[in-house]
Image: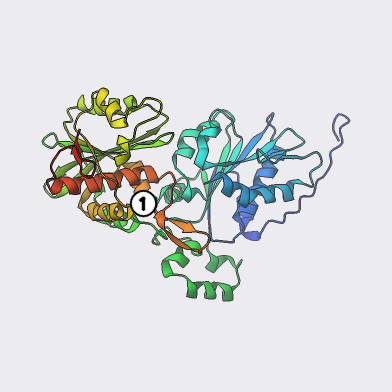
Amino acid sequence: MADGQRVTAVVVPYRPRLQFKPFHARTSRWSVLVCHRRAGKTVSAVNDLLRAAMTCARPRPRFAYLAPFYRQAKMAAWDYIRQFAAPIPGTAFNESELRCDLPNGGQVRLFGADNYDALRGIYLDGVVLDEYADMDPRAWSEVIRPSLADRLGWAAFVGTPRGRNDFAKVWDDAGQNPDWFRLMLKASETGLLDQAELADARKSMTADQFAQEFECSFDAAVIGAYYASLMVQAEADRRLCGVPHDPAARVTTAWDLGIGDATAIWFVQQVGREVHVIDYYENQGQALGHYVQQIEDRKGRGWVFEAHLLPHDAEARELGTGKTRIETLRTLGLTGLRVGPAQSVEDGINAARLLIPRCWFDAARCARGIEALRGYRSAWDEKAKVLSNRPLHDWSSHAADAWRYMAMGLRAEAKKMPEYVAPQNWMSA
């Protein structure tokens, strides 16, 4: 009791599993947990957030749980938030905002990385990034990390591996930094799952699936990934390296044009049979003039452009202006425009696969694009319980779609298709 105020002990119905006690006892600001399926990581993460929000000494504490998709955050964590926070007297739940308001003024709120821009401008005292392997890495670097700065907030990266993507990098980097806490929980070591169940799962899963989902392998082939194995081979061949611009070769670009979404551009040079991937640029919420300026900036550095390959929908007329985007780009001074026909995604993916073994990628300038190619994969058909024959639309789609247009465009140019205006052909604009 202090200054006449009564201190009330509150018992939350959570008993930490032995395997997660080091996580709860950590003192590091940054942490990464790599956990097998059904280890209990989300329950642990939710309770860690609630405890932090209730014990934070700063005014108006704010904590967040972030999942790859908003709907996923609701399905994975909201019921746990309600279950474990309900015994705390004075707690209120805002269903529409997925927000838990605690009696000390603290909040725990759920967000999705599919709309990470919604977090811009807020402050955070702590955040859990659950299933980080499936998130757009920009959610962390551009939005979440700055939101922690003034309050010196903490972050925990949690999930199961999904190949050698940014989550693997976080894990590897944490191992070299004593300021980080890291924990890996493999099903063969934790004892959390029945051994007979694991043996049965092994029978019905591929070796890569089992290694990824239960043994926390970052090196297992990503389930349903289109290009991951090709990018692994490119890395093994040391084709992810430094690839400078060659003044003797012209540059070709391939664009994925977003409407209310990201626009992605690849920059390549053909040198003999090799394709040198020298740059990648992506942004969103920008007018077409912004991307034309990116081309002009590179011209100022001595780059000479051969062609700009655009998807077929660049010829669609916008209702507001009555113009096509190719007309707008031409008006902005961009020349060498080529528009491709509508092609099946399957044909484009096949062309993209054939292109990658010919490519040398600049590892630094193309880092985000490389990450996207590694992560681009099939959607999951929840009804049929199988991988779909269509790609998953997520943050990696923009770079992957632009890469398909590049592959199809270079193939068309190799066949020396005539440059005339016809919807069924690549054409000069």
Disc 1 element: helix
- Location of the C terminus (image quadrant): top left
- Location of the N terminus (image quadrant): top right
Amino acid type at image mark 1: Arg
Q: Which residue is located at x 44 percent, y 42 percent?
A: 137
Q: Measured from the top left, where is residue 39 in percent x and y?
A: 59, 60
Q: Quadrant of residue 314?
A: top left
* Relative depth, front residue between 46 and 293: 293
Q: Relative to residue 341, is residue 260 drawn left or right?
A: right
Q: Measured from the top left, where is residue 34 in percent x and y?
A: 51, 55
Q: Which residue is located at x 29 percent, y 46 percent?
A: 342
Q: Residues within 10 Å of mark 1 (few under 14, many from 20)?
A: many
Residue 69 seen in this snapshot? yes
Q: Measured from the top left, where is residue 192 in percent x and y?
A: 61, 66
Q: Which residue is located at x 46 percent, y 36 percent?
A: 141
Q: Measured from the top left, where is residue 236 in percent x and y?
A: 27, 56
Residue 25 seen in this snapshot? no
- What is the count of numbered marks? 1
Q: Which residue is mark 1?
A: 374
Name, please, the residue furthest toward the right. 4
* Relative depth, front residue between 331 and 47: 331
Q: Quadrant of residue 41?
A: bottom right
Q: How is the image coloured?
A: rainbow
Up-down relation of residue 47 to residue 105 (above or below):
below
